[in-house]
């Protein structure tokens, strides 16, 4: 769903490499903040109109993907390009304001 990059255009199908890993950050008071960093590696050229911060990704049910992703919608928090036609979408479960 290209909510921000192409708001009047229909969603389209693309593929990517899903990664999710835990991250721990030590705070100033020595407590640990635990979070999950979820990303999707993509080929930028597969996104004709581009993809940007604020867009949404909906995962389809595919044979090799984790079952818990089927139908899940995530928000694109950041887009990093690698300079070689690829990129990585940093995904979050919800926007900071609480909307999905």
Image (spheres, rainbow, N blue to C red):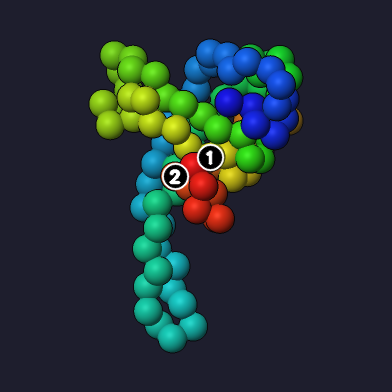
- Can you tell which mark lies on residue 93? 2
Q: Is residue 43 left or right of residue 64?
A: right
Q: 58 or 89, which is in the foreground?
A: 58
Q: Is residue 19 left or right of residue 89?
A: left
Q: 42 or 83, which is in the foreground?
A: 42
The residue furthest left is: 67
Picture residue at 37% right of the left edge, 25% below the top: 71
Image position, residue 24 (x, y; %): 40, 63
Picture residue at 50% right of the left edge, 17% below the top: 15
Q: Is residue 97 above or below residue 60?
A: below
Q: 38 or 9, which is in the foreground?
A: 9
Picture residue at 40% right of the left edge, 82% below the top: 30
Disc 1 is placed on an element classified as strand
Picture residue at 57% right of the left edge, 39% below the top: 76
Q: CA distance from mark 2 to mark 1?
A: 6 Å
State yes or no: discs 2 and 1 in contact (Cβ < 8 Å).
yes
Q: Is residue 29 above or below residue 63?
A: below
Is there any visible trace of residue 82 in the rendered image?
no
Q: Is residue 55 left or right of residue 39?
A: right
Disc 2 is placed on an element classified as loop
Name the residue tied to disc 1: 75
- Can you tell which mark lies on residue 57? none
The residue furthest bottom is: 29
């Amino acid at each position: 769903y290209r909510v921000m990059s192409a708001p009047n255009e229909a969603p389209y199908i693309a593929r990517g490499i899903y990664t999710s890993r835990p991250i721990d950050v030590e705070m100033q008071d020595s407590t640990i903040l635990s979070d999950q960093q979820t990303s999707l590696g993509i080929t930028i050229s597969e996104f004709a109109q581009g993809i940007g911060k604020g867009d949404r990704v909906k995962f389809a049910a595919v044979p090799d993907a984790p079952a818990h992703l089927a139908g899940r919608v995530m928000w694109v928090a950041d887009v990093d390009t690698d300079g070689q036609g690829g990129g990585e979408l940093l995904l979050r479960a919800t926007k900071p304001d609480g909307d999905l």
